[in-house]
Image: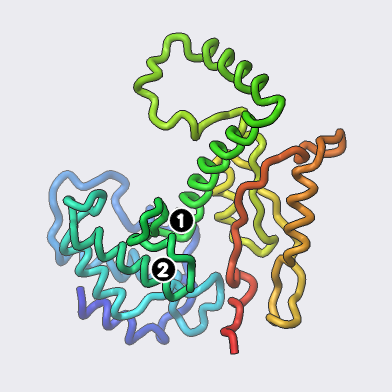
């Protein structure tokens, strides 16, 4: 398999960026039912070229210009082989001490490389720390969910301190009693982060150049998302959302509700920002 992978990379230029296949091609090449008996490795290995590679979109072909690079390299291939061979799952420290602590060290490196505040470090006394997600889309969703939980708690605390706070509290308790008369509240974990009365008010922002995964993540998080118009920045020689555009959107969404829009009186809680996108290059290095 190692030789096969090396040959694939060495012969990349001889392939085409896109395969010459149509949707549904694979049904004529593999059985319609799962095998009832094991097959030899030589037979499985022989299927890789015709079934997989001949129908593969070769993202690392020199003539492939769609989407973005997947940051693949020989070291990353070796790392995937090692990870697959070890096969541990690092959901707790004891399940894999090395995996857990390597993640902590690497995320601390990232904090220092980006010159972020110290409270993002794992060694800091505060609750903040980094973690590695499987994809950028998953990372955006986790960030939105964390921001949503924080916003719900903050919104409720701020509301309770206002003159209408007692109305919200009493009405919410009444609704909870009507809905949950038969529910054992002692078994509910962190209910304070899941208040539907607050979730409907939350709104997040992103650029009109933002990736489509941000829209999907907002849908999964159950929050509104507003795309902001980007404009050409002569200094950066790129497109960006200007600070005054974001500030104006936040002020508008916080305003008193009117009949012309349902967005008013919302609670802004997150901004998804990008350094480059599928359509535009990343911000150039500072000189």
Quadrant of residue 287 within the rendered picture: bottom right
Between 214 and 7, the one nearer to me in the picture: 214
Residue 139 numbered tag: 1
**C-alpha gap between disc 2 and disc 1:** 26 Å
Say how the picture is coloured.
rainbow
Q: Residue at x 57, y 42 (%)?
A: 151
- The quadrant the N terminus occupies is bottom left
Q: Position of residue 105 (x, y in %)?
A: 30, 67
Total tally of numbered discs in the picture: 2
Residue 3 numbered tag: none
Quadrant of residue 255 within the rendered picture: top right
Label whose residue precedes the other's in the sequence (2 or 1): 2
Between 33 and 249, the one nearer to me in the picture: 249
Instruction: Tell me the residue that label 2 is attached to.
Output: 56
Between 94 and 162, the one nearer to me in the picture: 162
**Label 2: few (<14), some or many (≥20) within 10 Å?**
some
Q: Position of residue 231 (x, y in %)?
A: 76, 70
Q: Are marks 2 and 1 in contact (CB under 8 Å)?
A: no
Quadrant of residue 274 within the rendered picture: bottom right
């Amino acid at each position: 398999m190692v030789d096969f992978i090396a040959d694939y990379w060495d012969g990349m230029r001889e392939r085409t960026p896109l395969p010459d296949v149509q949707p549904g091609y694979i049904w004529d090449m593999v059985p319609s039912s799962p095998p009832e008996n094991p097959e030899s490795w030589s037979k499985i290995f022989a299927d890789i070229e015709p079934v997989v590679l001949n129908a593969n979109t070769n993202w690392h072909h020199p003539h492939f210009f769609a989407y973005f690079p997947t940051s693949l390299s020989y070291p990353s291939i070796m790392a995937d082989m090692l990870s697959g061979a070890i096969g541990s799952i690092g959901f707790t420290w004891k399940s894999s001490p090395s995996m857990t602590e390597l993640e902590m060290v690497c995320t601390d490196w990232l904090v220092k490389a980006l010159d972020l505040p110290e409270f993002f470090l794992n060694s800091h006394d505060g609750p903040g720390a980094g973690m590695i997600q499987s994809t950028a889309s998953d990372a955006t969703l986790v960030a939105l969910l964390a921001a949503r939980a924080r916003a719900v708690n903050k919104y409720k605390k701020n509301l309770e301190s206002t003159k209408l706070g007692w109305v919200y509290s009493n009405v919410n308790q009444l609704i909870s009693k009507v809905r949950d008369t038969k529910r054992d509240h002692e078994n509910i974990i962190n209910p304070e982060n899941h208040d539907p009365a607050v979730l409907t008010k939350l709104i997040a922002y992103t650029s009109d150049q933002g990736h489509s995964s941000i829209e999907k993540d907002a849908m999964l998080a159950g929050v509104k998302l507003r795309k902001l118009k980007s404009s050409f920045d002569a200094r950066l020689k790129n497109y960006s959302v200007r600070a005054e555009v974001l500030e104006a959107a936040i002020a508008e969404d916080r305003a008193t509700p009117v009949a012309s829009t349902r967005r008013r009186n919302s609670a802004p809680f997150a901004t998804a920002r990008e350094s480059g996108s599928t359509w535009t290059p990343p911000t150039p290095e500072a000189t």
